[in-house]
Amino acid sequence: MTQKLDIIVFDPAGNTTIMVLTPVPRSQYAETAKKLLEIDFGPQCSWREVAFGEQVAFIVEEKNQDVAETPIMEMCGLEFCGNASRSYAYYRAMFLGEGEGVGGEKKKITVRVSGCSDLLTAVVDPVQRDSIIQMPLPVDLKMIDTAPVGIEGTYPLVVFDGISHIVIPGVEADEDTFHRIREFIYSDVDPEMDAFGVMFINEEKDLMSPVVYVRDVDTTYFEGSCGSGTAAAAVAKAAAETEGTFEYVFRQPDGTLYASVTKKDGQVTEIGLGGIIEMTDILHVEV
């Protein structure tokens, strides 16, 4: 059975995201995503010659007791994704004209997304092609001894609702290493995570390489960039700080993201995530 879909392809700092505007039942998310991820959208993406999607998001209308029809963006595996959330805010402001003016051409907008129980606020800047979103706060930060997988040291696992990331410097990103870490985390730390990532940091090259696993669709991606992973790395860097706002820039394989972490009395009170977004017009595909 084929479907005719309206989609937009977003490139939030290299983390190519296919956003499906046409309603699709959740039961068909995985099958639809698989087909879309096989398409090279390079001819439609002026900024990139080859553009296979790394992830797929779906826009739905969901009834809510406070709002008659609350738009929501759901990831294929119902996990949380920072870059897709930034892209969704960008779509709402740029395509639908929604949001509150906050100076110049900037707009502030709230969005509801999968893997996060709270509404998120973003400021969309069409001049800078940026969407700066206030990320959900971590629910925990655990120090994990990775000696059981052959990596000596203790590294921070930053836990968010919907996804968790461990930040490991000095280790090359490769599939075998990632799978060993993933199996250890799921068996010994938390078997219930919706999604899990390893942020491999090469300090000599000033490069962070994100690798992310989504449990419900059983997929692993070496991502061009990772929003929630960037937030996790920023939280890890700010772990020793007690008061103030701290800004970090993370260069990643296909783009650069920046994050700010605000702390009060040693606690994280706010995380901001931003970076350039590219996007196509609405595309019509049949899969």
Image: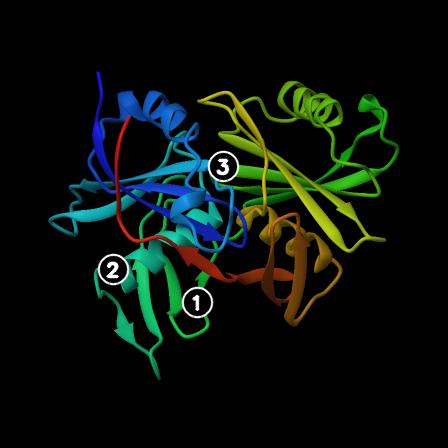
Relative height, residue 178 to residue 7 (above, below): above
167 and 285: which is toward the camera: 285
Q: Which mark is residue 54?
A: 3
Secondary structure beneath label 1: loop
Viewed as shown, does residue 213 lie left or right of 96? right
Q: Residue at x 66, y 71 (%)?
A: 243
Splitting the image into 4 quarters, where does residue 159 fall? top right
Q: Secondary structure at mark 2?
A: loop
User: Mark 1 sits on what residue?
Assistant: 129
User: Where does the image place residue 179, in percent across and percent down from the top left?
Assistant: 68, 22
Dot placed on the residue nearer the N-terminal end, 1 or 2: 2
- Of mark 1 and mark 3, the one earlier in the sequence is 3
Q: Note whether residue 138 is visible.
A: no
In the rendered view, tell whether residue 6 sits above or below residue 45.
Answer: above
Query: What residue is pinned by disc 2?
Result: 95
Residue at (54% x, 50% y) in the render: 14
Quadrant into which the N terminus falls: top left
Relative to 204, residue 32 above or below: above
Amino acid residing under circle 1: Arg
Q: Label 2: how many residues lie within 10 Å, few (<14), some (14-19) or many (20+)? A: few
Please identify the quadrant where the C terminus is shown: top left
Spatial separation of the CA atoms under disc 1 and disc 2: 13 Å
Measured Cα–Cα span from mark 1 to mark 3? 20 Å
